[in-house]
Amino acid sequence: MTFSISQFCYALPGKLREEDKRLHMTSSFWLTLAALLLWPAPWAFAAVFLIGFAKECWDSRYGSGFCLFDLLANLIGSSFAMVLAWALPGTLFNS
């Protein structure tokens, strides 16, 4: 199945409203904040991205299939966590 960038962008707002995508965003948000307690930001971001990617690879083999929208939702959740950690005062998170 071919999927163009314009089709992807057109479908994106509707897809991000799905409960599954909101779960991906929420999970990656909290995982990123937890990872930032342990590691510097690039490591934390990479670790959470790889967890999400591994989950999608698992889904492609044993679940509902690989979904780029799930990966994008993971990136959105992780990005919000990075911005929040950067904006909060103090040294709670590694940077």
Image (spheres, rainbow, N blue to C red):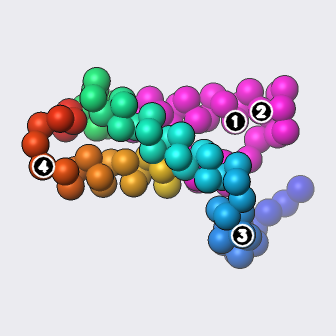
* Number of other residues with Cα within 10 Å of mark 4, as a class: few under 14, some 14 to 19, many 20 or more: few
Q: Would you say the residues marked 2 and 1 are in contact, meaning their CB atoms lie under 8 Å apart?
A: yes
Amino acid type at mark 3: Gly
Image coords of residue 18 (percent x, y): 72, 59
Which of the labelled discs sits on residue 89, or is there none? 4
Whether residue 59 appears in magenta in the rendering, the answer is yes
Marks 2 and 1 sit apart, C-alpha to C-alpha, by 5 Å
Side (left or right) of 4 relative to 33: right
The reply to whether residue 71 is visible in this rendering is: no
Q: Secondary structure at mark 4?
A: loop
Q: Name the residue tied to disc 2.
A: 59
Depth check, front residue: 10 or 28: 28
Q: Can residue 60 be found in the magenta stretch?
A: yes
- Percent across and percent down for residue 44 are 36, 32
Q: Nearer the viewer, mark 4 or mark 1?
A: 4
Q: Tell me how far mark 2 sits from mark 4, CA to CA.
A: 38 Å
The stretch of residues the image draws in magenta is 45-74
* Quarter occupied by the N terminus: bottom right
Residue tagged by mark 1?
Answer: 56
